[in-house]
Amino acid sequence: MRPYVYTMLIAIFLGLLWAFLTFTSIDRGWFHTAIAPKGDIQSFSTAAQNEIATRSQGNAVLLLIADGEIYSGYTHSTKQAINQQTLFQVASLSKWVTAWGVLSLVEQGKLDLDTPVDTYLSRWHLPPSQFDNTKVTIRRLLSHTAGLTDGLGYGGFLPEQDIQSLEQSLTQAEDASPGKDGRVMVGIEPGSAFAYSGGGYTLLQLLIEEVSGQSFNDYMQQHIFQPLGMMRSTYILDTHHENVATLYDTQGKPATHYKFTALAASSLYTSGHDMTLFIQAHFPTNDLAAGRGVLSPEMLTRMREPHASELGADIWGLGTILYASNNKGDFIAGHDGSNEPAINTSVRYNPATGDGIVILETGNKFLATELAGEWVYWQTSNIDLMLFSMKSEQMINIILLGWLVLILAAIARFVRLYKAGSPRK
């Protein structure tokens, strides 16, 4: 029996080693090649523009920021021309900007990050659960660690449809993404794990309205967009808004602009120009502090403090994704957005260098995220969270292929042992 046991143990050891090495090689980018030489921003700009020109089936805008200033801008459209002022719907990128709205109320002393969110609400409350709802705090909602299990995803409502009220959507979202039941409720122990929740940001939308006494969009206009100079940005697209990017599907066909109840989670319309202002607001200039008086520099730093992790990696701060280490004791931060039929947006910045990237795109489901991930790798030589996630299917296939080879080798070894008269006594 011993040869059989030894063969099995060796196969198991090699299988675990293969999985570890495959995971590590992708996580560390051992075989990943940057799309441009490190430090050569012009080469990166050219390579990224070429990718967009080749792969986009719709509209796209790309802006690169170096040392706090716009280095280059590029727009692409398969049909009607666009520019840096063109409004794009940016899907979940909305959440990062929403976080600024929540934290501005914290800075004003109207909210406390660690107070139960229900304390501030009167129009709707979390339904009873087997868990302690008082542990659902603003800090945990911002970082997707509040134990909400909705997993939303909002598909939106057709232009001719009436949208739900905010309270109705929180109770049962009619536009829930496929496979989600649309209820915002506590399903795991708050604070115990990361669980992405669009419903948590819809709850934060209600929080802003209740505490400020204004509609969500009005508050964001007055306290975030106007002070930052983001004069084109809005969470509600009205008929008076001009120069709006047509949405396209992956075949390059025009698609519908949906309406949303869940404005804070999904509905921001913004331009490349406005998002560069948003990134620049994270950096100090000669006469302006980081945060531009909307948030303090200290609060911006707190936003990048890790609050959620997966597989041992810090992935989320207060409203912002922590994509990768910037090798300076901090993180490349920002947010992505993705929605049907093919909206993909990505904004990232490096607090140590004043560098950043803005990609707003429709017509390709992954292009913005891929190119922003390439920017992170070009900046830091680190594979970022989103690029790693996109490579995960490839990683799993490689691991399974290696395991299949080991299983076949073990079977062949067993056959040889059997023919040789094993097991021996």
Image (cartoon, rainbow, N blue to C red):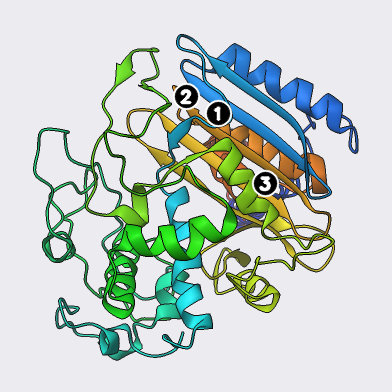
Q: Residue at x 28, y 90 (%)?
A: 119
Instruction: Decide: few, some or many residues near mark 2? Use Cα within 10 Å; few <14, some 14-19, many ≥20.
Output: many
Q: Position of residue 213 (x, y in %)?
A: 28, 75
Residue at the spot of label 3 = 18
Quadrant in which the N terminus is drawn: bottom right
Q: Is residue 294 left or right of residue 101?
A: right
**Of the residues under marks 2 and 3, which one precedes in the sequence?**
3
Instruction: Decide: few, some or many residues near mark 1? Use Cα within 10 Å; few <14, some 14-19, many ≥20.
Output: many
**The one of 47 and 27 positioned closer to us in this rendering:** 47
**The one of 144 and 272 positioned closer to us in this rendering:** 272
Q: Secondary structure at mark 1?
A: helix
**Of the residues under marks 3 and 1, which one precedes in the sequence?**
3
Q: Residue at x 76, y 35 (%)?
A: 32
Residue 367 is labelled as 1
The answer to whether marks 1 and 2 mark residues whose Cβ atoms lie closer than 8 Å is yes
The answer to whether marks 2 and 3 mark residues whose Cβ atoms lie closer than 8 Å is no
Residue 40 is labelled as none
Q: Position of residue 181 (x, y in %)?
A: 16, 55
Q: Position of residue 338 (x, y in %)?
A: 42, 40
